[in-house]
Image (cartoon, rainbow, N blue to C red):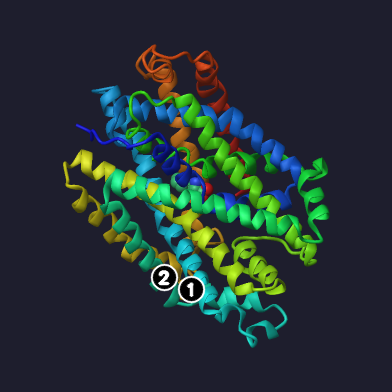
Amino acid sequence: MGSNVTFRSKIGLVAATVGSAVGLGNIWRFPAETQANGGAAFLLIYILCVAVLGLPLMLGEFAIGRAAGSDPISDYKRLSPGSRWWMIGITGILAAYVILCFYTVVAGWTLEYLVDSVSGSLYAATVAGGAEPYKVIMEQNITSDLKPVIFSIILILANGAILLGGVQKGIERISNLMMPLLFLLLLVFCVASLTMPGAGAGMKFFLTPDFSKVTASTVINAMGQAFFSLSLGMGVLMTYSAYFPKDTRLGKTSVIVAGCDMLVAIMMGVIIFPAIMTFGLEGETFEGASLVFVTMPEIFAHMPMPQLWSTLFFLLLLVAALTSTISISEVAVRFLQDRFKMTRRKAVILVMLPLFLLSPICSLANGSLSDIQLFGLTIFGMMDFFATNILLPLGALLMALYYIFAAPKGLLRNELTNNGLIKAPYAALVEMLIKWVAPVLILIIFVCTFIKF
Ligand code: PHE
């Protein structure tokens, strides 16, 4: 049997799900992709991907999760007993674990930058002396063997502590607190950015589509971004929707969650582009982590009160990363609880324990272990690639196949209409998109990813 726990309030349910979706994907990947792929041209394609692929798949996960009310493996077992469809859930739980390993490392960097912002060491006069001080600092921070490990372990402990609080008193409570804070911080940064001298030029860059930069890989990146940013394909949404009360309107919820996720991405564009235009940083490319850990400190160093702005920014990033980390861990915690009838405490400890070893290995992949490489990728890079580009789309593809071949008749419609209590005229369209459009698009992503690789 699964759990009978539900989120306590509608606001809490939305806050938790938005908390999962809004993360490093919005704050760092989205602006970087937008910069590289023709500004608003990328934004438009991304909006299309969210509408055609993201929303239907989100609803597909919500329907399975709420109908079955358990973890990604048990959900399929309950809905199709005696079949092997439950194996789909394995990709989800595996993806959750792999993402957790490197996500905690990046979240650990964020914590380190927050601490260095508060203490002011990031902006110490000596530091600002070199030619590219923040690039050097980032490299030192990331490649060091000890500090990032310590910070990621602190993060894992915080994550575990919140999870121990349970669904209502841990996840929901922390999301209710952190999401308003996140939006407030974003708003402060938007106002600051829009009053900078380069605001006009920045917004022009962001909102003028440059279709000459659009290639096949732009579209693939936009689809990948939709997957990652909406937390699709790994059972996070399935796990959270198992905690949705039966009267939650899934259609409305999905639009709110995807809308908030999009809003945060767009707000990040509004924040970043005016600032880089103002300080003449438009020539920089935001590869990898450099947007948040190099360009942003550079911007703050040019502003009055760099320490304050930097503290607020890394707090924002930490909040976003932590609420996502919690949701990823919850997939594995729920699984252990339901499958092996464990207490929550035992499940949380069991999920966290291996992380104390795996997350440091991931961290060292940027330091002492950086020579261990496969296809030119470090252990860190491999985990990111394997989970983001393979496991997430695979999980979603298999779910689409489940809807085509095995899902109980009317599953989606029943869930979208709360068993006939409300209207959902879009149910047929959503079902069509899940069954026929999503698999084709995902297969295209796969083929292109392998060709690119
Ligand atoms: N959606 C999160 C982000 O944008 C990351 C994430 C991926 C969270 C998959 C859960 C599952 O950063």
Q: Is residue 419 above or below residue 60?
A: above
Q: Is residue 132 above or below residue 156?
A: below
Q: Position of residue 123 (x, y in %)?
A: 61, 79
The residue indicated by pointer 1 is: 115
Amino acid bearing label 1: Val
Q: Position of residue 108 (x, y in %)?
A: 45, 66
For image coordinates 47% across by 33% down, the residue present is 396
Q: Label for residue 224?
A: none
The residue indicated by pointer 2 is: 151
- First in sequence, mark 1 or 2: give its number: 1
Locate residue 102: give its quadrant.
bottom left
Q: Is residue 39 above or below residue 237?
A: below
Q: Position of residue 128 (x, y in %)?
A: 67, 82
Report whether residue 261 is seen: yes
Report whether residue 446 is seen: no
Q: Is residue 73 left or right of residue 426?
A: left
Name the foreground residue: 10 vs 358: 10
Locate residue 250: give its quadrant.
top left
Amino acid bearing label 2: Phe
For image coordinates 49% across by 49% down, the residue present is 180
| Local SS, label 2 | helix
Name the foreground residue: 453 vs 269: 269
In contact (CB < 8 Å): disc 1 and disc 2 = yes
